């Protein structure tokens, strides 16, 4: 098994996902299978092949340093669950012990 | 690494030292701190700094929103910097050029191939829940800058003074660091990379821990940010201060950042550990955050070094942790954050294609590099005959050095100009908290005023008052002198009248002079100056006074 239940719990916590026991079991199995499948790549000899940084064979896409109009404030805040004035309002950041 | 909690620091005020202010405080602090170095005899302090500088581009790094400071909240945002679904970032070429320029100024190797990566973490100031940064292929690496070593922590070992030269006694007495050509410390630069700024959080209530909600302004999110990481080559809090000042001067000279700590465009985190002198292994390090001013960097590190040394002396272990510098209490405290073990799961940013940095581009940028502070210092010494101390202080700020040179070209004696720039001008800037670009006084104005002293129109003492007026109003010296009737009294008859009054009113001191107590002359001249509101020519007044007293005998 390339992945354990603890791995799934850890990754879920990092991604802020709350998983039930059953989900943890099934995801451990499913993710394990995906990783096993990806393991097939190890059969290839990649000696001397530079790591791929991007799937597209394109490089150096730049824009010039020019200011363009921003969104109207009301549009920017339109989807905010909560706001105060023109700030986004967010829940407390630090946990108390 | 960008600090997850950097937003919290915006609330905490600090006595910031802007512009020239640092020149002064660097001297004062070092004199004060030098006593506290005794513990460094047994222990060695190891410091590495992580500096973040916002770049002076007009638009953000991945979108066209303005980077202007101080706009209304969330007025410089768009779907890209707000991280809305389906948008694509495009790299601002200027930001890349600025990072390369910085790399060249810091003696770095410029990458042939570079890319951006995603750094994943959740924090409200980060709209996309990841920061576009650079992980394994930064734009620049393996550079260095040289700073004067803090001689109070040198043990003389070869490891202690890389590139060290025999020290002359400097003119800056009492300071930990000699102003003369003392030993040099080479601080290696590990890497320089580009990333995007986070937004700015304002926490309700007293602080982040107690607040029940926070407010987010994303105007800052996406401003190009450059991270400059040093190797752990810094050996004292004082050196950290000097390294940071030197780095700031370079970034300002090359025009990539305005480096205003008070506006957050320059920020600094520090890694610090201590070890018994002679040991080659590093001790457990702590990461120090919330160092919001140059002074805080030095004070926070000094506190933390002492705390760690104390712990080791008591036989305790130093815990590897992140600590917060509490400016008000003058201590560091452990920080707890909601985020568990840092696990950023970096991976190549799929929305951006890699960069292949053409050598022609690098060479073009190299050719356009302006004169750097170190080179300018050497030139000011050679061209204007300034002492090293003056040249070093003046070239700490490009604006200051520009002011000096523009004035010195119009006046006969550069050393006098240097005295005024380091003295009165620095003092007034310091007191007003202003930058030299914000005050109306001009280099030409100062040169004209100095000529008035030479012509005998005003005394040196009056000149200080005149200069203060020039500093705040920008008026010409000649005009101020005329308006306020400050012209020096060089008329013998007029002065003699006053001298006679002073002699009549001060029989005691007059008798003292007669009895050979020459010091009393100084008092009498002082009285003449007082009666003329400082307008008497002091040399003339002294001569006339002596003559009168001789006659009177």
Image (cartoon, coloured by chain):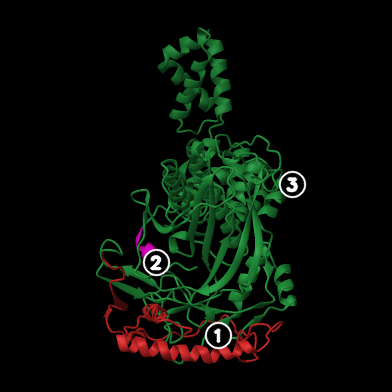
Question: Which chain is mark 1 on?
Answer: B
Residue B391 locus on image (x, y percent)? 65, 46
The residue closer to the viewer here, B514 or B127, is B127
Q: Nearer the viewer, mark 2 or mark 1?
A: 2
Inspect the magenta stretch and tell me whether residue B180 lies in it: no
- Give the residues drawn in magenta, as a range: B8-12
Q: Horizontally, is B158 left or right of B289 in the view?
A: right
The residue under label 3 is: B382
Residues at circles 2 and 3 in contact by the CB criterion of under 8 Å? no
Along the polypeptide, which appears first: circle 1 or circle 3?
Answer: 1
Q: Which residue is mark 1?
A: B90
B272 versus A75 height, above or below: above
Is label 2 on the same chain as label 3?
yes
Question: How many residues crowd around disc 1 within 10 Å: few (fewer than 14), some, or many (20 or more)?
Answer: some
Marks 2 and 3 sit apart, C-alpha to C-alpha, by 47 Å
Give coordinates of residue B138: x percent, y percent.
61, 72
Q: Nearer the viewer, mark 1 or mark 3?
A: 1
Residue under the image location 59 percent in, 74 percent down: B136
- Asked if residue B11 is among those painted magenta in the image, a careful observer would answer yes
Numbered label attached to residue A92: none
Q: Position of residue B429 (x, y in %)?
A: 48, 50
Dividing the picture into quadrants, the one containing residue B358 is bottom right
Tell me, yes or no, if residue B549 can be seen here: yes
Residue positioned 55% across, 55% down in the render: B244
CA distance separating discs 1 and 3: 46 Å
Return the chain for callout 3.
B
* Mark 2 closeness class: few <14, some 14–19, many ≥20 residues within 10 Å: some
Q: Which residue is mark 2?
A: B5
Q: Give the residue drawn at x 44%, y 63%.
A: B263
């Amino acid at each position: 098994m390339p992945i354990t239940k603890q791995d799934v719990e850890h990754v879920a916590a990092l991604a802020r996902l709350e998983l039930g026991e059953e989900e943890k079991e099934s995801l451990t199995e499913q993710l394990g299978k995906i990783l096993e499948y990806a393991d097939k790549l190890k059969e290839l000899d990649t000696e001397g092949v530079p790591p791929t940084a991007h799937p597209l064979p394109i490089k150096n896409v730049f824009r010039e340093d020019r200011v363009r109009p921003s969104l109207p404030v009301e549009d920017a805040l339109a989807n905010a669950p909560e706001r105060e004035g023109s700030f986004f309002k967010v829940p407390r950041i630090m946990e108390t012990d | 690494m960008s600090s997850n909690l950097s937003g919290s620091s915006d609330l905490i005020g600090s006595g910031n030292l802007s512009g020239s202010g640092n020149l002064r405080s660097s001297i004062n602090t070092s004199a004060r701190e030098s006593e506290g170095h005794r513990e460094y005899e047994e222990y060695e302090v190891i410091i590495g700094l992580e500096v973040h500088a916002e770049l002076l581009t007009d638009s953000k790094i991945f979108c066209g929103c303005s980077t202007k400071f101080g706009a209304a909240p969330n007025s410089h945002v768009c779907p890209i910097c707000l991280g809305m679904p389906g948008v694509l970032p495009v790299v601002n070429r200027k930001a890349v050029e600025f990072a390369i320029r910085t790399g060249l100024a810091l003696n770095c190797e410029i990458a042939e191939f570079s890319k951006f990566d995603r750094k994943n973490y959740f924090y409200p100031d980060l709209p996309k829940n990841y920061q576009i940064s650079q992980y394994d292929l930064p734009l620049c690496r393996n550079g260095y800058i040289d700073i004067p070593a803090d001689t109070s922590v040198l043990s003389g070992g070869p490891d202690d003074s890389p590139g060290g030269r025999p020290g002359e006694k400097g003119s800056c007495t009492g300071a930990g660091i000699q102003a003369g050509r003392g030993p040099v410390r080479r601080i290696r630069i590990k890497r320089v990379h580009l990333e995007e700024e986070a937004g700015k959080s304002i926490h309700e209530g007293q602080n982040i821990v107690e607040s029940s909600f926070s407010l987010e302004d994303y105007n800052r999110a996406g401003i190009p940010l450059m991270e400059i990481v040093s190797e752990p080559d810094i050996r004292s809090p004082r050196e950290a201060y000097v390294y940071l000042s030197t780095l700031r001067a370079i970034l300002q000279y090359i025009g990539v950042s305005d480096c205003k700590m008070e506006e957050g465009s320059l920020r600094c985190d520090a890694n610090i550990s201590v070890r018994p002198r002679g040991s080659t292994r590093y001790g457990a390090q702590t990461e120090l955050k919330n160092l919001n001013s140059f002074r805080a960097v030095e004070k926070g590190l000094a506190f933390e070094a002492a705390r760690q040394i104390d712990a080791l002396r008591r036989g305790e272990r130093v815990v590897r942790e992140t600590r917060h510098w509490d400016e008000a209490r003058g201590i560091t405290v452990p920080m707890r954050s909601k985020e568990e073990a840092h696990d950023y799961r970096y991976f190549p940013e799929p929305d951006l294609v890699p960069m292949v940095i053409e050598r022609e581009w690098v060479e073009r940028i190299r050719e356009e590099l302006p004169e750097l502070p170190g080179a300018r210092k050497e030139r000011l010494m050679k061209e204007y005959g300034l002492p090293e101390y003056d040249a070093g202080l003046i070239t700490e700020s490009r604006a200051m050095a520009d002011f000096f040179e523009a004035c010195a070209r119009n006046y006969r004696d550069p050393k006098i100009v240097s005295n005024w720039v380091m003295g009165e001008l620095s003092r007034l800037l310091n007191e007003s908290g202003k930058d030299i670009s914000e005050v109306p006084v001009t280099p030409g104005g100062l040169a004209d005023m100095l000529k008035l002293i030479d012509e005998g129109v005003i005394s040196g003492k009056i000149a200080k008052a005149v200069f203060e007026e020039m500093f705040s109003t920008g008026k010409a010296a000649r005009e101020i002198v005329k308006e306020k009737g400050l012209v020096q009294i060089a008329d013998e008859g007029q002065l003699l009248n006053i001298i006679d009054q002073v002699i009549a009113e001060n029989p005691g001191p007059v008798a003292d002079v007669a009895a050979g107590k020459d010091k009393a002359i100084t008092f009498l001249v002082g009285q003449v100056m007082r009666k003329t509101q400082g307008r008497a020519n002091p040399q003339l007044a002294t001569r006339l006074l002596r003559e009168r007293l001789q006659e009177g005998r």
